[in-house]
Image (cartoon, rainbow, N blue to C red):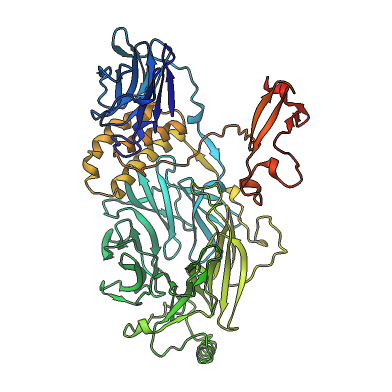
Amino acid sequence: MSISYGPQGGTVIGRNTTDIARWKRYRGGTAGELWVEAGQEWRRLITLGGNRALPLWLGERIYFISDHEGIGNLYSCTPQGEDLKRHTHHRDFYVRFPAADGKRVVYQAGADLYLFDPQSDHSERIPITLGSPKAQQKRRFVDSPKYLSDVALSPSGKSLALTSRGQAFSLRSWEGPVVRHGDGETARYRQPVWLHGEEQLLVVRDRDGEVTLELHPTGRNADLLAQPEQLSGLDLGRPLEVASSPQRAEVALTNHRNELLLVDLGERTVRQLDRSQHGRVQGVAWSPDGRYLAYGFQATPSTCGLKLCEVASGETWNLTEPVLWDHAPSFDPEGNYLYFVSYRTFDPVYDNLHFDLGFPKGRKPCLLTLRADLPSPFNAAGQAQRDDRESDKEADDGKVDKHPEAQTTHIEVEGIANRIVAFPVPEGRYSDVHGVKDKVLYLSHPVEGALEQNWFGADEPPAKAKLECYDFGGRKNETLVEGITSFVLSQDGSTLCYRAGNRLRVLKAGDKPSEDKGEEPGRESGWIDLERVKVSVNPAAEWRQMFRDAWRLQLEHFWTEDMSGIDWTEVYRRYEPLLERVASRGELSDLVWEMQGELGTSHAYELGGDYRESPQYPQGFLGADLRFDPEADAYEITHIVQGDLWDEKASSPLAQTGVNVRVGDKLLAGLRQVILDNLR
């Protein structure tokens, strides 16, 4: 709410008034209204079709912002709501944040300040020369773990690729140089994947509003000064997941258009393998021989099943008949099973506070046997067959090539939907199921309440999951590590890297780590020293990339293809020149907000960001009403908020057990300071 006072004691207030430039042309139920009181009852000042905000009472007129004619400009009327006049005529940018000195009005439009003089009914731009060093634009280094995003293990598990603050790096796990790939100051890199053979690293690059794939050399004899290869001209959409073939120079890619694409890196071609009409592809995995792709496919708006695609022919098959949601597939490294997470366990739980039933868990890791003659690995027959295969391998030791070709993965599609087996583990909240030799790894997450969740992001992702392992040999499930965020495997299944908040640890896959190795980075403990990764930031270049990316995200994801009739390209051309005037991260946020406000829609937000920290001085509150008692020369407590007395966050601190403060008591001192002296 905003408020202004008239010369004769009148008052005008703005209800529901905000910065209307952030939601232009809003006409909904919470549009701003102006109310006036001038010796009578409160009444609406004026009724217009648009959004009104920020009233200022100057002399005999009340000034305010309104966009009822399409653009937010400065208007005025009499205190009786009559004689409406328009005083500014901006066509490109809204009038924002008007303020007055009792005679004149100063306001912002675009990146400029203007002064309006009611006497001349004229507005002019205020020329300002600011001798600022623009400290927030200076190049600096930032903490790489704080901005850690993507992590990938090389196929052999000996090296890591990661992105931090939109920059791509590769490094040996515990020693050696760290290589930064590409120009991370003018582009954003994400989703690094190692290609077969570990000679190249593929990354997704966002620059100048265009998405391309880049190939960077990483081999021991690579020329690290060579320019990366750019796969320009490919219609990729916005890549969401990239998976590298274990055998060929190919990657599978999913995007925001619900497509599954195959990119041939040698031929520089892209081919659509599948597309859902109802939602995004939910995980994609290559078979060990690189012939097949398994992926989660939304066949209806409310269900997701698994599908299989033969890459060479493009032929696809349905693998599961989902009860609700089957997703996140991964192949057994020996090519016998396909693992995935399924929502199909219905064991209702009674609510303790409300007479109702719910399904707070409902998930289990499951598998499909890829051939009809394969028994379940969880029973004696399956174990016997596994032992026989192991014996055959041991008998063949010394006879096979040291570098054998990948064993062909045979998949019998007929009847495969009926060959589904759930893991013999309790239902829970499982994710990320992956197979290693004779074992399967997956995450289990706790059931949590929503009150303490941070919906606007945090400096560090939560690390509350457990890494669990099912051992086929012992037919048992055990917890390997607690308190982790996520994990990835090397392509050969030998090595695991897990993330715990903003830390990384590399271990032998399937083994329970010893906790007596300490927390110091190194081979013995497995912890990675991320301080080796130096992230240099050029804020002005970052801001330009971020601004273009924000514009493109709206273009690609807006709820209607015609952008609600807005010429979105023209909007970009109008706002982009203002980037030269941006001097801080907060100003960039404001510019993005105003640009997105042109869409005239709700839930078009800009949140988070690397803002310069300001001092925090949180205040404590008594949760009580006080009144001054002149006879006692002290403040008397007249009311104590009770709230939920069992919850210290939901009641007055004066109401807590043992405080022994009552209504009628006098407040004399606090923290050894006399209250009255500090309030006078």
Judge by depth and name the residue closer to the eye, 553 or 403.
553
What residue is drawn where x is 46% and y is 75%?
345
What residue is drawn where x is 34% and y is 19%?
63
Up-down relation of residue 400 to residue 544 (above or below): below
The x, y position of residue 136, in whole percent, is 50, 30
The x, y position of residue 524, in whole percent, is 67, 62
Judge by depth and name the residue closer to the eye, 445 or 634.
634
Quick one: quadrant of the N terminus?
Answer: top left
Residue 123 position by quadrant: top left
Up-down relation of residue 611 to residue 234 (above or below): above
Judge by depth and name the residue closer to the eye, 115 or 67.
67
Q: How many marks?
A: 0
Judge by depth and name the residue closer to the eye, 646 or 75.
646
The reply to whether residue 632 is visible in this rendering is yes
Q: Is residue 285 left or right of residue 561?
A: right
What residue is drawn where x is 56% and y is 34%?
613
The x, y position of residue 135, in whole percent, is 51, 27
The reply to whether residue 493 is visible in this rendering is no
